[in-house]
Amino acid sequence: MEPKIIETIILIPTYVLLLYASGKTIDKTVENSLMQKTRAKVIKKGVNFILLVIMLSTLFFIWGVDQSELVLFLSSFIAILGIAMFAQWSILSNITSGIIIFFNHPVKLDDTISIMDKDYEIRGRVSDIGLFFVVIKTMDGERVTIPSNVFVQKMIKQHSHG
């Protein structure tokens, strides 16, 4: 069998094993209450992304993809992505707000909150905090999705911690 195929066959289960091990390590850290569930979820996504990039880079190396062409493709992709984000300030604003919520906002997953607005008030439990949106499940069972940048700007009253 060709060495490239053998190396690929070894790489893929190793990647899956690393995903599993990193997930278990993060879960164990949450159980020991050294990390909050919300942060653990985001850190898991970040670790999974980094492992995916490493695995793909290794696959490219195994199969002999020309590095100069790969660098050219990636730099072009990043440039286009940067232009698209610059053109869409709201997306960039949501990403920045999502990072602020992750690191510095007092509201956490499963907290019961009220979002104060001059026209109406939304009261419910925070069911998900993502990079772009915060999802609140109201007392009536409805799901309300609020963009991260709006969530950061509103006055929020906490009723209980999750």
Image: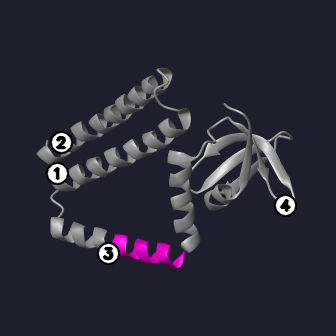
* Label 4 crowd (10 A; few <14 / some 14-19 / many >=20): few
* Label 4 vs label 3, nearer the camera: 4
**What residue sits 55% from the left and 75% below the top?**
88
Alpha carbons under labels 4 and 3: distance apart: 45 Å
What amino acid type is highlighted by mark number 1?
Ile
Query: Given contact means CB atoms under 8 Å apart, are the residues at marks 4 and 2 in contact?
Result: no
**CB under 8 Å between discs 4 and 3:** no
Q: Which residue is mark 2?
A: 7
Instruction: Tell us which disc is closer to us: 4 or 2.
Output: 4
**Lateral position of residue 157 relative to residue 82, left or right:** right
Q: Which residue is mark 4?
A: 118
Q: Which corner quadrant holds the N terminus?
A: top left
Q: Assign the C terminus to one quadrant of the image.
A: top right
Name the foreground residue: 83 vs 98: 98
Question: Mark 1 = which residue?
Answer: 62
Q: Which residues are magenta?
A: 76-88
Q: Earlier in the sequence, mark 4 or mark 2?
A: 2
Question: In terms of sequence position, does the residue under pointer 1 or pointer 3 come before the other?
Answer: 1
- Label 2 amino acid? Glu
Residue assigned mark 3:
76
At label 3, the amino acid type is: Ser
Residue 137, x across and y down, in percent: 76, 42
Q: Residue at x 73, y 53 (%)?
A: 155
Determine contact: label 2, label 1, CB under 8 Å.
yes
**Quick check: 108 left or right of 92?**
right
Q: Secondary structure at mark 3?
A: helix
The circle drawn on residue 149 is none
Q: Position of residue 62 (x, y in %)?
A: 16, 51
